[in-house]
Image (cartoon, helix red, strand yellow):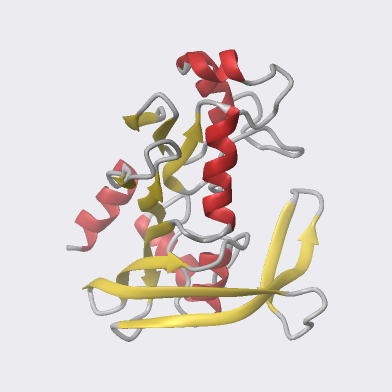
Amino acid sequence: MKPQVIEETRNWVAINKPPNLVVHDVPGNKHAGSTLVDWLRRQIPEINDNFESADERPGIVHRLDADTSGIILVAKNPNSLKELQTQFKERTTIKKYWALVLGTPPAQGTITGDIVRKSSDTKHEIKRLSFSWDKKAAKMAETSYKVLKTYQSNFSLLEVQPKTGRTHQIRVHLSEEGWPIIGDQLYCNKESRQASAELDLKRQFLHAKKLEFNDPESKERITIQAQLAPDLEQILKRLE
């Protein structure tokens, strides 16, 4: 699967990122040699024209985990990059994800809890995060959700909105509530691992579905939506 352009202006481009694609190269990258930045430099001329060749994150406004699919916003020039990054920092953007979890949460709710690194597998560069009451190290995180649909009485499709932007926030919060994301091999339990194996899902069922932000030039409110990735669509069809 290749990245797909959802919408494009002279200042930014919204991409539907496929799974198994890192945004930019990092140490220990298991997908080394193929990144979204590589694709952008080949496909979007303004990236090479307006950013230095040594820039490892040209135009990258925000991040998505390698195995998470969906919308990622890319600026085409430094001024737009600064403006869009400020919106993310000040939390004036709205990000909504779809996640399939094991369990049946209440119809809607908000999860609040501090997140901190718990341990690290340095061999594989895996950062495991969890709740913490150590206020010196932890960062406050808040996530709201609503149930979109329930499948087979024990799977729930959620629309999830992170109010903060902590690493692995959605995955940690849902797992800590007892609703691990199907396919997640890091924040999981025995039952969710078994369900993931039975569904033959090779990555977490997490998709950046919707993004709202202000155009950096016109200040118009923009809403972008990304079609669900094919592998996730197949999972939902199997559960029908």
Name the spot of residue 240 as percent of width and height, x first. Answer: 17, 63
Which residue is at 44% across, 28% downward? 11
Note whether 53 is above or below 122 in the view shown: above
Q: Quadrant of the N terminus?
A: top left
Q: How many callouts does the rendering have?
A: 0
Q: 133 or 165, which is in the foreground?
A: 165
Q: Residue furthest front?
A: 218
Which residue is at 57% across, 32% downward? 79
Which residue is at 51% across, 66% downward? 170
Note whether 145 is above or below 62 in the view shown: below
- Any part of residue 126 in sight: yes
Q: 206 or 75, which is in the foreground?
A: 75
Q: 37 or 237, which is in the foreground?
A: 37
Give the quarter of the image for residue 32: top right
Q: 100 or 54, which is in the foreground?
A: 54
Name the spot of residue 229 as percent of width and height, x first. Answer: 33, 44
Give the quarter of the image for residue 98: bottom left
Q: Is residue 56 left or right of residue 105?
A: right
- Any part of residue 66 in sight: no
Q: Is residue 134 left or right of residue 159?
A: right
Q: Is residue 81 left or right of residue 160?
A: right
Note whether 83 is above or below 88 in the view shown: above
Which residue is at 51% across, 23% downward? 40
Name the spot of residue 6 as percent of width and height, x first. Answer: 31, 34
Name the spot of residue 155 as percent of width and height, x first. Answer: 31, 72
